[in-house]
């Protein structure tokens, strides 16, 4: 298996591996590294029982010093 990393699936493989019960987990946090690691651990621990898949991190945040 590919480690349940959605970003590593080729387009034709998406339908073969994911179904209506699949849960896509995308880390949303200003600390992208920590959120990514948390998501990886979550998927590793509960992947088969919950059909979890890790999405690439989506960094976002509010930095008033840049406004």
Image (tube, rainbow, N blue to C red):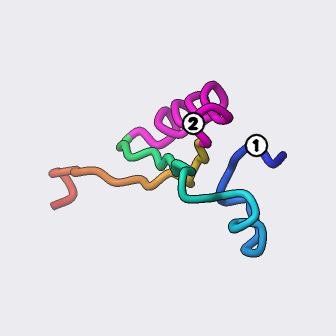
In this picture, which residue range is highlighted in magenta?
31-51
| Residue 9: in magenta span | no
| Residue 36: in magenta span | yes
Question: Residue 21 bears which disc, if any?
Answer: none
Helix, strand or loop at disc 1?
loop
Question: Residue 50 bears which disc, if any?
Answer: 2
* In this picture, residue 31 sits left or right of residue 7: left
Q: Assign the C terminus to one quadrant of the image.
A: bottom left
Where residue 45 appears, as percent x and y from the top left, is: 63, 25
Residue at mark 1: 3
* In this picture, residue 26 sits left or right of residue 15: left
Query: Given the current orientation, which residue lies at the most extreme front position?
Result: 20
Between 32 and 53, the one lying in front of the other is: 53
Image quadrant where residue 19 sits: bottom right
Query: Given the current orientation, which residue lies at the most extreme right position?
Result: 1
Q: Residue at x 74, y 62 (%)?
A: 9
Dominant secondary structure, magenta: helix
Q: Which of marks 1 and 2 is nearer the N terminus?
A: 1
């Amino acid at each position: 298996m590919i480690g349940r990393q959605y970003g590593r699936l080729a387009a034709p493989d998406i339908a073969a591996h994911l179904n209506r019960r699949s849960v896509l987990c995308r880390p949303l946090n200003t600390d992208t590294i920590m959120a990514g690691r948390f998501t990886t651990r979550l998927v590793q621990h509960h992947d088969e029982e919950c059909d979890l898949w890790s999405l690439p991190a989506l960094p976002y945040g509010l930095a008033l010093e840049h406004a």
